[in-house]
Image (cartoon, grey):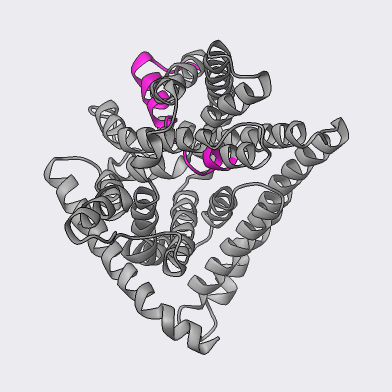
């Protein structure tokens, strides 16, 4: 094992150095054109991935030189990237005023439901018009249904709008959206494998509900006391270590019951937000996260994109990309209007719910692995993720221009 580690370590360090430099260069260039840093990091990832660096080096040197996420070093970078998004959502939860977040509960639920229904029906309808079978069309609709909160949270932080009524509604809706997506995933999985039962679906929903009830109830009761207690121990950075350990354990539990680890991380941050050491903890996690892990996630997300893989996708790919740019804006915007938001704030909510990422790719991969749909759906999912991930930061910044700033 020691020999294997010594062989891969140089590649890991090389990848890590290149990714961090690319992330900061991308951030600097994004700042130059007055765009959020996350957009620069995503573009930087595309530049050092197969689509640009790989294609260019192949033509210049006869060999493809790029950040290969399928290699051993690339797999390690992917792990670091997942830690990055977990830390980002932990920071988001840690920064929340719980009472303020509670106020967004009903609007968030309405926004999540209307957004999921609109996106699913549009995707299902377009696929059906192009003669896809009902189950295939359902997979297409599911890809569009789930919002990825990571990019929006990072962008809202960049424009100082996370801790506003609109920001809280987006964050709450994204968490509810994730739960709905897990239920959809369970239903489609059961249909694809021919093993769906009403009892199995009920058990899955019950597990998710139990997770939130137990973690929130126990967390709010114990975490402030635990962090205060360990803070008295004479061990260097013991509070930070224990807090991160709790985040990773809750994230692991969330993954085990098929809730995204990043949702677990957000809940962990929420239960620690009332702790007396929350402010100090937030500063330390921010240093660790933004200095290393969080930029890796967005660069890796860009590097994972192979634009050449999209050439074989059918006309549905283009249709899905177009739909993905306005289905959440329309669906979530209608939900926001119904919840009492004004037109401008409803538009902001809709734009904030636009990006897709992990869940979309998981649903597409499951559909392809079961043989329900062809591998082309994976390419379509990549296009949807790419388009929404790249366009959301710029649109969020534009939509929130002139919005009331968050309270300090």
- Furthest-left residue in view? 32
Left or right: where does residue 297 sit relative to residue 187?
Answer: left
Camera-nearest residue between 245 and 28: 28
Q: Position of residue 69 (x, y in %)?
A: 42, 59
Main secondary structure along the magenta-highlighted residues: helix
Q: In this picture, is 131 found above or below 86? A: above
Residue nearer the viewer, 362 or 194? 194
For residue 158, side relative to residue 250 (left or right): left
Which quadrant, please, contains the N terminus?
bottom right
Residue drawn at (29%, 48%) of the image:
46
Lateral position of residue 41 relative to residue 286, left or right: left
Name the residue furthest bottom.
Answer: 2
Spot occupied by residue 86 in the image (x, y as percentages of width and height): 50, 56
**Is residue 15 among what the camera can see?**
yes
Is 349 covered by the magenta stretch?
yes
Residue at the image position 42 percent from the left and 69 percent from the top:
73
Residue 192 position by quadrant: top right
Q: Nearer the viewer, residue 359 or 72?
A: 72
Image location (x, y in percent) of residue 397: 26, 33
Q: Which residues are magenta?
A: 339-362
Quarter assignment of residue 218: bottom right
| Number of on-image labels | 0
Task: Tell which of 333 and 214 is nearer to you.
Answer: 333
């Amino acid at each position: 094992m020691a020999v294997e580690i010594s062989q891969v370590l140089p590649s890991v360090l090389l990848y890590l150095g290149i990714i961090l430099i690319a992330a900061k260069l991308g951030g600097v260039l994004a700042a130059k054109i007055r765009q959020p840093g996350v957009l620069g990091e995503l573009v930087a990832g595309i530049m050092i991935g197969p689509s640009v660096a790989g294609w260019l080096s192949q033509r210049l040197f006869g060999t493809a030189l790029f950040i290969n996420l399928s290699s051993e070093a690339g797999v390690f970078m992917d792990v670091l990237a997942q830690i990055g998004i977990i830390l980002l959502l932990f920071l988001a939860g840690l920064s929340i005023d719980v009472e303020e977040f509670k106020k967004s509960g009903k609007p968030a639920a309405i926004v999540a439901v209307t957004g999921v229904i609109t996106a699913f029906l549009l995707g299902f309808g377009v696929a059906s018009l192009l003669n896809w079978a009902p189950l295939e069309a359902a997979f297409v609709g599911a890809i569009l249904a789930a919002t990825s909160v990571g990019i929006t949270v990072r962008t809202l932080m960049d424009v100082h709008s996370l801790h506003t009524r609109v920001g809280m509604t987006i964050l709450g809706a994204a968490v509810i959206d994730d739960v709905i997506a897990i239920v959809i995933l369970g239903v489609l999985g059961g249909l694809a494998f021919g093993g769906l039962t009403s009892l199995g679906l009920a058990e899955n929903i019950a597990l998710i509900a139990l997770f939130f009830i137990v973690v929130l109830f126990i967390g709010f009761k114990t975490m402030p006391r635990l962090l205060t207690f360990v803070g008295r121990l004479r061990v260097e950075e013991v509070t930070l270590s224990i807090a991160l350990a709790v985040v990773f354990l809750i994230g692991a539990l969330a993954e085990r019951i098929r809730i995204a680890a990043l949702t677990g991380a957000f809940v962990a941050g929420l239960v620690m937000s009332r702790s007396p050491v929350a402010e100090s903890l937030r500063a330390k996690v921010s240093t660790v996260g933004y200095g290393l892990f969080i930029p890796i996630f967005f660069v890796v997300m860009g590097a994972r994109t192979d634009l050449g893989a999209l050439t074989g996708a059918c006309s549905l790919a283009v249709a899905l990309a177009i739909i993905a740019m306005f289905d959440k804006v329309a669906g979530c915007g209608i939900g926001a209007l119904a919840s009492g938001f004004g037109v401008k704030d409803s538009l902001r909510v809709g734009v904030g719910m636009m990006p897709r990422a992990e869940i979309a790719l998981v649903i597409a991969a499951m559909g392809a692995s079961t043989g329900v749909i062809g591998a082309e759906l994976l390419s379509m999912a990549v296009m949807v993720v790419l388009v929404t991930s790249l366009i959301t930061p710029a649109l969020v910044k534009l939509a929130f221009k002139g919005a009331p700033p968050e309270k300090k």
